[in-house]
Image (tube, helix red, strand yellow):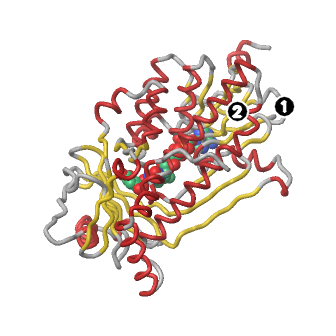
Amino acid sequence: MSDQVRDAVVRTQVGIVGAGPAGLTLAQLLARRGIESVIVENRSREYVEARIRAGVLEQGSVDVLTEAGVGGRLAREGLRHDGIYLQWPEERHQLNFPALCGRSVWIYGQTEVVKDLIAARLADGQELFFEVADTAVHDVESERPSITFADAGGAARRVECDVVVGADGFHGVSRDVLQSQLAESRRRTWQRDYPFAWLGILADVAPSTDELIYAWHPNGFALNSMRSPTVTRLYLQVDPAERLEDWSDDRIWDELGTRLGVPGWTLQTGPVTDRSITPMRSFVSTPMRHGRLFLAGDAAHIVPPTGAKGLNLALLDVTLLATALEAFFTDKREDLLDSYSDDALAQVWRRTHFSWWMTTMLHAHGDDFDHQLQIAQLRYVTSSEAAATSLAENYTGMPLPPER
Ligand code: FAD
Ligand code: DHB
């Protein structure tokens, strides 16, 4: 073998495709257990650190990130929220999570989670290739799967490993590799495309609210969230065909003011620093494992953002996977790897249902009859302790009860 070819081959235990929250957290959890990994990511470090997405962490996610060694800044800068407001015209009601289910959630942006994880990875001196091209996954039915890619300089590389984890998001390559190896009878996908999208903005202005406001309005849903005491995050339900160019700052603020307004309360406005439109869909792909290839996070499932579950679910997957891989590498046990797909999917479907339910309750759709049903549901959730507790348990990510 020539020196050049030998240099191009890296040997590791776990090859990870994707440096999003799933791939990066898994790598840190494995490192803590003495298991080596290599991550390949097709975007630049700057790009993945700036990609504005989720903002709400369940307590379980905070615990996992702390275990992964990145809990420091999160503990200092994260904002604990003990509830949310649910709103419809003229009425705003608070749900108090600790009172209902003994748990809270934390506000800390996905950008910050990713920055902390990348810094920890690089500080440990562990391999993380950014700006790769042509990622491909091979031989997943063998005990020596591999990942090939062109590195940032264009050189061909191969990562030889015991296990490959596809944590490459909804548009990655891993899910297709897994599905293509299975007979039609052994694979399945489910998808629901919703007839709405979210127009999201980030603004340099102190939040006008102490807790998130989820507002139903006949013009469409609106959400008042935040990232810090000086940065506000806001969303508007829009048609998926809507174009960002048609939404001036004034139009966005006017519409937010209308949908979020209640008597005696004013939405503070400020400079908009980021804007985007995101379509909404539910998607589940099964199984989440074939041979030595495992899927985690958005590579296997997508939820609409209304329940704030996407990021939290990605962290749940890799928590299960880290435990299963530890049993495999340290005790040669394969039982947890074998049950990974079913274990993860139980969590996935619970959150898929919750996200669909929140989306259906809060987004204006259908006719006047549908609107009356939605308001009846909102009144029920904010007045019945049983209904409010159910929402609180799901929103804060209470562990699932054991199956009977
Ligand atoms: P990702 O974050 O998608 O990470 C996958 C990584 O793999 C990316 O860095 C990608 O560049 C890389 N990759 C892809 N293909 C390849 C390849 N071929 N080779 C190498 N690397 C590859 N959730 C919420 O809870 N609230 C929100 O407000 C919210 N907003 C969102 C807005 C948008 C636009 C999107 C797309 C998602 C949003 N989500 C939200 C969902 C949440 O952000 C995701 O669930 C979360 O990012 C999942 O993490 P992940 O690591 O599984 O996937
Ligand atoms: C945010 C996003 C969500 O989907 C949500 O339900 C709550 C907050 C956010 O980006 O802040």
Label 1 crowd bin: few (<14), some (14–19), many (20+), radius 10 Å = few
Q: Amino acid at mark 2?
A: Val
Q: Amino acid at mark 1?
A: Ser
Q: Residue at x 73, y 37 (%)?
A: 293
Image disc number at residue 142: 1
Q: Is residue 329 above or below residue 77?
A: above
Q: Is residue 57 above or below residue 139?
A: below
Figure quadrant of the N terminus: top right
Nearest the eye: 274 or 296 = 296
Nearest the eye: 402 or 104 = 402
Image location (x, y in percent) of residue 177: 75, 45
Q: Is residue 189 above or below residue 240?
A: above
Image location (x, y in percent) of residue 333: 76, 25
Q: Residue at x 49, y 46 (%)?
A: 398
Mark 1 falls on what kind of element?
loop
- Judged left or right of residue 1, residue 329 is left
Ligand 2 rendered quadrant: bottom left
Image location (x, y in percent) of residue 147: 71, 32
Question: Residue tagged by mark 2?
Answer: 164
Image disc number at residue 184: none
